[in-house]
Amino acid sequence: MVRWRAGVVATLRRRWAGAVELDVELTDGTSMRALAYPELVGEPEPGDRVLLNAGALLMGLGTGGYAMVVAVPDRLPQDPPQALDSRDAGHLVKARYTPLQPILLGVDEEASPHREVLAAAEDLGGLPVVTADLHSALPAILAGIRADAPHARVAYLLTDGGALPAWFSRTLAGLRDELAGTISVGQAFGGDLEASTLHSGLLAARHVLDADIAVVAQGPGNLGTGTRWGFSGVAVGEAVNAIAALGGRPVGSLRISAADPRPRHQGVSHHSLTSYGRVALARAELVAPDGLDPVLAAEVDAALAPLADRHTLVRVDDTGLDAALRRSPVPLSTMGRGLDADHAYFLAAAAAGRYAARLTSTTPPPPAAS
């Protein structure tokens, strides 16, 4: 369960949208790196006493090397300005029945300025939606979109399989100017808009953010047990179903790698094969780049062949995508590997972005073959 630590803020370090990193001197004289979300716990200052949840850090699990600040008990933030019994600021509770549950304004609830639009919204009107099982695919997908559609409006839907607070992601903070907005769905929170379900989030992307393309992926820090079904990214298949149910166009980004040391993730990851091959009941367009190493390309073709009856397999010309990836405004990294160390992974994600871009009215068609 929770491994508690108490200490005093020694130093404030990096800061990005919604988060601040700090060093905490513990009561036993040791120090610990921690992360605070000021909108939840207030602004920590040097000398403040803080309470930490250090369990995941002490166990070496995926929290980015941080303990999490639970409270600044001697200087609590003020209550929100609205009356306690007012719902004008929203009554959507996320991270429900946990000690830090935030109460937020849902994009489609009664007090929202978007209520009328979303109450009437029924479908996505063919909106291309790229699905990916890892947060690290997001900047690569965006690079592929920008290669062909530099002015397309792109919405990101943060699902709740990984980090719940959007603020945890430095990648997302660095992409703010590249996105029409972030919608946090399910138990996730901290986006520009809050949605209770992926379905309402998708409708908000289309009808509130006026997106040309949407991207659905969990936050950083996914949960996995090393088994076929014990991985939070399996929800990608459920996203395909939601997109299709609303009249969108699902575009599957495949997790492809020649660098992952784990056999189950080499070629096409077993997670992609499970998500699209077993969970997704609706048809998606699964994208692979043309420029893979021939050996890897053959492995990908063999892995995808059994999915050909239930999905449309698409090959995309990857000319210019490497350059687009190298122009990314944020570092590219997956499982500690950068672009050159795991080129196929990022190239595949960028190819899915390029394909989605070519489905929009904002992108001219590719030149005809001579």
Image (cartoon, rainbow, N blue to C red):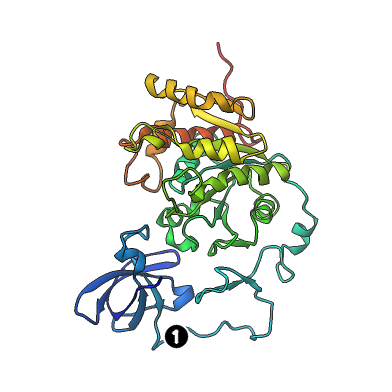
Instruction: Give how far across and how far down residue 74 sits, in percent.
Output: 39, 89
Q: Name the secondary structure under disc 1.
A: loop
Instruction: Give how far across and how far down residue 124 sits, in percent.
Output: 72, 45
Task: Identify the residue at horizontal 66%, vertical 66% (top origin).
Answer: 106
Q: Quadrant of the C terminus?
A: top right
Q: Which residue is mark 1?
A: 76
Q: Nearer the viewer, residue 143 or 202?
A: 202
Q: Nearer the viewer, residue 327 or 87?
A: 87
Relative to 191, say whether 309 is above or below.
above
Q: Nearer the viewer, residue 291 or 28?
A: 28
Q: Quadrant of the N terminus?
A: bottom left
Task: Identify the residue at horizontal 37%, vertical 44% (top origin).
Answer: 334
Residue at the far right: name it.
Answer: 120
Instruction: Give how far across and how far down residue 187 sits, in percent.
Output: 57, 63
Quadrant in the picture for residue 125: top right
- How crowded is the residue under tag 1: few (<14 C-alpha within 10 Å), some, or many (20+)? few
Tell me the amino acid under the disc marked 1: Leu
Q: Nearer the viewer, residue 286 or 111?
A: 286
Residue at the far bottom: name it.
Answer: 74
Task: Identify the residue at horizontal 55%, vertical 73% (top origin).
Answer: 102
Q: Is residue 293 visible?
A: no
Relative to 144, say whether 111 is above or below.
below
Quadrant in the picture for residue 328: top left
Instruction: Give how far across and how far down residue 243 sits, in percent.
Output: 67, 44
Q: Is residue 368 left or right of residue 340?
A: right
